[in-house]
Image: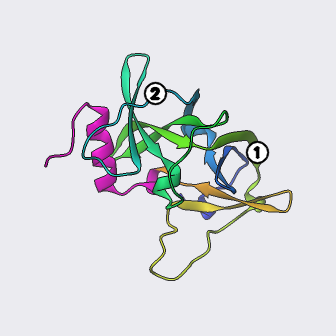
Amino acid sequence: MSVADINEARQYLTFRLDDEVFALDVGQVREILDFSTITKIPQTPDFMRGVINLRGSVVPVVDMRLKFGMGCTEKTVNTCIVVVEVQFEGESTIIGALVDAVQEVFELEPSQIEPAPKIGTRLRTEFLKGMGKQDNRFIMILDIDKVFTMEELSVVQGAGAGETEPV
């Protein structure tokens, strides 16, 4: 989905990674959990922190700071896991996104969203739906379905099913 596809006001959940503010469409957010014990899965990418038990289901947890090259998320009183639903090959996958802090839910009109900047060919920005403007600041609106490559999601799905990547 691009900015052109956003033709009505939508609600977004904002969260912080370091000093940057990101947003997700609330329609893809299942719930927000306090930071809990994460079981590490061997031989998974660094950004894949492990899995948690969510009411009997195994949910893979991804460190969003590591995914975006910001360094490992440190546990604080505000650190939490945003449980999101990602579409992968026509199927829904539940992933926990480890973030520094959740901020608020707010509504943006299409006129408050600009296209993501095109930064040459070497930097990936296709995972951004656009840049939201609120109170003279920019908020990066993520297209959570495009944050991970198909290969990365396959590893995450395997971890969620209790599998590990082959050696």
Residue drawn at x 66%, y 45% is 15
CA–CA distance between discs 1 and 2?
Answer: 33 Å
Q: Secondary structure at mark 1?
A: strand
The residue labelled by disc 2 is 37
Question: Which residue is more in the foreground, 91 or 46?
Answer: 46
The residue labelled by disc 1 is 107
Whether 151 is among the magenta residues is yes
Residue most extreme to the top: 55
Task: Say which amino acid is labelled 1.
Answer: Glu
Residue most extreme to the bottom: 120
Percent x, y for residue 116? 61, 69
- Decide whether the magenta segment is chiefly helix, strand or loop: helix
Disc 1 and disc 2 in contact, CB within 8 angstroms: no
Q: Quadrant of residue 4?
A: bottom right
Q: Image check: 114 left or right of 143?
A: right
Q: Which residues are magenta?
A: 145-167
Question: Which residue is more in the foreground, 114 or 160?
Answer: 160
Q: Secondary structure at mark 2?
A: loop
Percent x, y for residue 160? 32, 33
Bin the neighbour count of mark 2 within 10 Å (Cα to Cα): few under 14, some 14-19, many 20 and up.
few
Q: Image check: 66 left or right of 118?
A: left
Residue drawn at x 57%, y 77% is 118
Percent x, y for residue 2? 57, 62
- As drawn, the label of residue 64 is none
Whether 157 is among the magenta residues is yes
Name the N-terminal-most of marks 1 and 2. Answer: 2
Task: Say which amino acid is labelled 2.
Answer: Thr
- Say above or below: 154 vs 117: above
